[in-house]
Amino acid sequence: MMDEEAMYRALVARDPRFDGLFFVGIRSTGVYCRSICPARTAGRGQCVFFEHAAQAASEGFRPCLRCRPELAPGTTGTSDRVDALVAEIRAGAMNGRRPFADLARTHGLSERQGRRLVRETTGVTPVQLSQTARLLLAKQLLTETSLPIIRIASASGYSSLRRFNEAFVASCGVSPTRFRGSGRAPRSDALTLRLDHRPPYDWPAMRGFLEARLIRGVDVLEDDGYRRTIRIGDHVGALHVRSVEGRFMVQV
């Protein structure tokens, strides 16, 4: 983890190169933010620094509504095996009844090894990591889509609407309905989500990489991005990715 004084300097500068590399909890407000948060920078004594969002959440800080920690770019650790395990947890592998021991075994680890390595990598337990990932996904879907709340609860890995409401209130301080308020996205047959990234990101080079690997009838490059057909189970659809000019993000 970076030196705290260096992190505070990056916070003051709102340097996008450090986005996602650390998070800061603000004692006076009880929220945690990204390094690029547009809100007025708190004094050094008010700041508590964390390497991962889940650590801030486990300490009782709520995600900031302005900088939206759920959009922060991810990081990688020192082990591909542990990175894969952490990524699977964040993707929802523990949302059902699958025991962590079984998940750890698929990565060649015992349950004890897996728990220790997840904590060493993320600073929290596998359960805490999973809980934070679910809540941040729900927060993004509430903000950026018009999906009904019951569908968001299911998509985020909650077994019931009641459990979702309880977890969301405990984490964010308001119900999902109040959180969404009048900010609900316009109804659409498509879902559009943003993915933030740290600079530099060479979108033209990525276009070139994709162009050399196009499959007729499957994917295509267009002036405003890349499009391909996808199949999930019995469902067929299309995925469209474009870089947003002047912003460190892509839209999917």
Image (spheres, grey):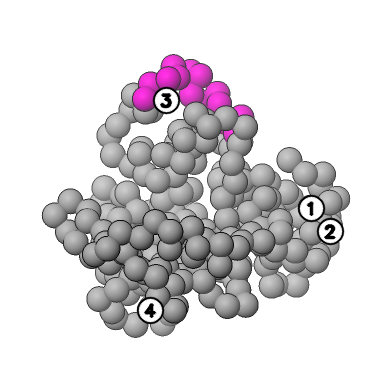
Residue 159, compared with residue 235, is above or below; it is above
Asked whether the beta carbons under mark 4 and mark 3 sit within 8 Å of each other, the answer is: no
> Between marks 1 and 4, how big is the CA–CA gap?
34 Å
The local crowd at label 3, few if under 14, some if 14 to 19, many if 20 or more residues have their Cα within 10 Å, is: some
Residue 193, compared with residue 188, is above or below; it is above
Report the residue at 28% width, 66% height from top.
Answer: 238
Q: Which mark is residue 7?
A: 1
| Residue to which mark 2 is pinned | 9
- Chief secondary structure of the magenta portion: helix
- Looking at the rendered structure, the kind of residue marked 3 is His
| Residue to which mark 4 is pinned | 185
Asked whether the beta carbons under mark 1 and mark 2 sit within 8 Å of each other, the answer is: yes
Report the residue at 17% width, 59% height from top.
Answer: 235
| Mark whose residue sits in front, 2 or 3 | 3
Q: Which mark is residue 107?
A: 3
Residue 143 visible in the picture: no
Badge 3 marks a residue whose secondary structure is loop
Q: Is residue 162 left or right of residue 79?
A: left
